[in-house]
Amino acid sequence: LQFWIIVFCTVIEQCFRFVESQSNPATDPVLLWLTGGPGCSGLSALLTEWGPFMVNDDGATLRNNPYSWNTKASVLTLESPAGVGYSFATDNKLKTGDDQTASENWEALVAFFNEFPQYKNNSFYVTGESYGGVYVPMLMQTILDRQNQSFINIKGFAIGNGCVSQNEGTDALINFEYAHGMIDDSKWERIKSQCCHNDTDGCPFHSFNSLDTCSLFVQTTTTSAWESGINPYNMYDNCVNVPGTEVSTRYRLEYKYRTGKDLDISQLSTVPCMNETAVTVYLNRADVRKALGIPSTLGPWAICSDTISNTYDRQYGEMTSRVKNGLDKGLKGMIYSGDVDMACNFLMGQRFSRKLGYNEVQNKKHYIVDGQVGGYHTQYENLHFVTVRGAGHMVPTDKPSVAYHIIDAFLLNKSF
């Protein structure tokens, strides 16, 4: 493999890792990747999801990834906001929120293109996953609003298992749990008649906030998704039984946001389900830190930051207006979802996409990857909604060939 990997840091020490396209970097698209959380590091995605090299389980060696997204595109990943991963704030002020993060990400992008002007004319796309469902539309809106200040050649966006609507997410999760056998049928029928006028598909579960039967059902059902011992990021994958709290950072942060409670591991049937040991060990090696230019005064890398997540101001729970604004201005978009993720499940993405109100120009249709059904594709004018069969929250990790297939089709206007 021949390509450049560039480390570039802004004045507030938000650090990019830029992986040059393996094909034609002079003309290939440039993607920005934003991992969610809020407060989780894009370096993890680079080394466990879509990058040219994957960390092996030993935490000491790497392997080539034949499905790297930089096969035909250059990819930036930004550790955002400042304080995440190896990025830091020079004034030590880490409290931030949606508006400030979008503004700082825009400033970081401007700094990057000023430093590397040879990429300014390349088509540019904002991508991300999870809370990237907020990061991506917020940054896209900021870019469009500030084009007179500094032009960025933005052409579109892609959001994977994105939390694009808090209310839709609550409503969809409850239907998702019932469809997957997690809610007793007699209770479901009772809730349907008492709370939903016999229409659970359109039931506004998110609006039940008094201490009655309906709201208690929503509370207990939502909490059970995170307390049952089922892996919420891939419900058909086993929970990884690794002791300690380092491996559960992302889970703990999301649990607290969803349930309003601190996670007590002793009360779970298993420990939290994500094993981040290998990438954590690798990124904290002295030789890796040196290669990445990490100051010796900076503490160890962690996949997510408790400090950022616990103080982050989630200002906006609904991304409809920002996504519509981008699409109405001619950008193309893709919302894709692994269909066995509970955290930001496919029903939310599907309903969100449909409710934007665009004409359906391609009815839901399966697509084939490696001789098998990869998932389903629906097109609403210049927006694609795509499911990935058997994938969880981190689609490129679970189904790397399918993830590459859909991002390649989207960027190059190929048939899905």
Image (cartoon, rainbow, N blue to C red):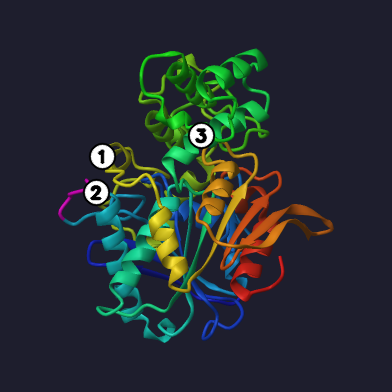
Name the residue at 38% across, 29% down: 256
Counting from the top left corner in percent of width and height, residue 406 is at 65, 62
Side of 366 where 253 appears, left or right:
left
Of the pair 360 and 114, the residue shown nearer to us = 360
- Residue pointed to by mark 1: 311
The picture places residue 236, in percent across and down from the top left corner, at 68, 33
The residues colored magenta run 91-95
Residue beneath label 2, please?
A: 96
Secondary structure under badge 1? Answer: helix
**For marks 1 and 3 on the same chain, the one whose residue lies earlier in the sequence:** 3
* Callout 2 secondary element: loop
- Rounded to the nearest whole Å, what is the CA distance between mark 1 and mark 3? 26 Å
Confirm or deny contact between disc 2 and disc 1 (CB under 8 A): yes
Q: Name the foreground residue: 119 vs 220.
A: 220
- Residue at the limit of the structure toward the left, as seen here: 91
Q: CA distance from mark 2 to mark 1?
A: 7 Å
Inspect the image, locate mark 1, and give the three-letter code of the amino acid beneath it. Thr
Q: Relative to 200, is 75 above or below?
A: below
Q: CA distance from mark 3 to mark 2?
A: 28 Å
Q: Amino acid at mark 3?
A: Asp
Q: Which residue is mark 3?
A: 171
Report helix, strand or loop for mark 3.
helix
* Lower position in the chain sequence, tag 3 or tag 2: 2
Q: Which quadrant would residue 104 be assigned to in this image?
A: bottom left
Q: Residue at x 40, y 65 (%)?
A: 325
Mark 1 or mark 3, whichever is nearer to me? 3
